[in-house]
Image (cartoon, rainbow, N blue to C red):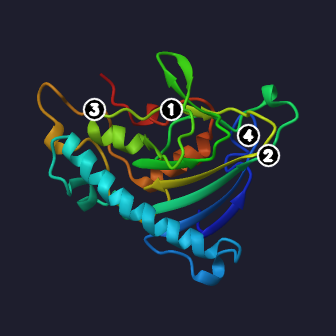
Amino acid sequence: MTKKVVYNTNFDLYSSPAANWRDTILFHMAPNPPEPEQLPTCCREIVTEFSKEMLNLGDVLFQLLSEALGLRSNHLKEIGCLEGMDTAYNYYPVCPEPELTLGATQHTDTGFITVLAQDDIGGLQVLHRNRWVDVPPMSQGLVVNLGTLLQVMSNDKFTSVEHRVVLKGAEPRVSAISFFGIGYTLNTRLYGPVEELLSEDNPPKYKKTTIKDLVAHAYKQGLDGTSFLHHLKLMD
């Protein structure tokens, strides 16, 4: 997590019950992006341009999410939700025995929001009413997942979606993902339920945490099919 350019297969290889079938290259693009020469020459320009566009989109999304919570439109931005962004590019090779593994195990995303661009192969599924439902690829469309931290901050008004990637077809799958929040571990701000949303009838359901502590917990737990929320939940 200290490097700005990371190439790996499973970030949680030594903590998860099983490995996933994918390779990932990840870039810490905000607040302090890598120097251009640190980026692979084959994708240097597009990674830089894509990250700029995702930060612009993130700005709009956080305004909309703030308003959806009944807050001022710049509330989430003012408390640092737009400060940190990682972009990850996943490659899922063709698997000879796809029924024996997953591209990504069941999980929720750790940070505030995740913006996903997927190719036309498909494989993303969300858990809805205890059933796995396909999220079909849409040409020029993006998928926005709400993360664990945003569920905590909204005190369950928003829900972080459980999702996974299954392996399909005879072609490899590629996705481009922008994670807002998870990589900016220098941010020491405590995040918990937003005070303006709390009342006697709606007391806080979660304790406060820093991004650094939540990411450390996620790395230790790995993608084991259980939510990262459990260790933040306050006892009734």
Residue 168 figure quarter: top right
Q: What element carries label 4?
A: loop
Circles 1, 2 touching at the beta carbon (< 8 Å): no
C-alpha span from label 1 to label 3? 17 Å
At label 2, the amino acid type is Pro
C-alpha span from label 3 to label 4? 31 Å
C-alpha span from label 1 to label 2? 27 Å
Q: Which residue is drawn at 49% across and 37% down?
A: 228
Query: Which residue bears the numbered disc 3?
Result: 157
Q: Is residue 190 above or below residue 194?
A: below
**Residue 227 - label:** 1
At label 1, the amino acid type is Ser
Coordinates of residue 30 in the picture (x, y in percent):
45, 69
Query: Which residue bears the numbered disc 2?
Result: 93
Q: Which of marks 1 and 3 is nearer the N terminus?
A: 3
Q: In this view, does 169 lie above or below 119?
A: above
Query: Which residue bears the numbered disc 4?
Result: 20
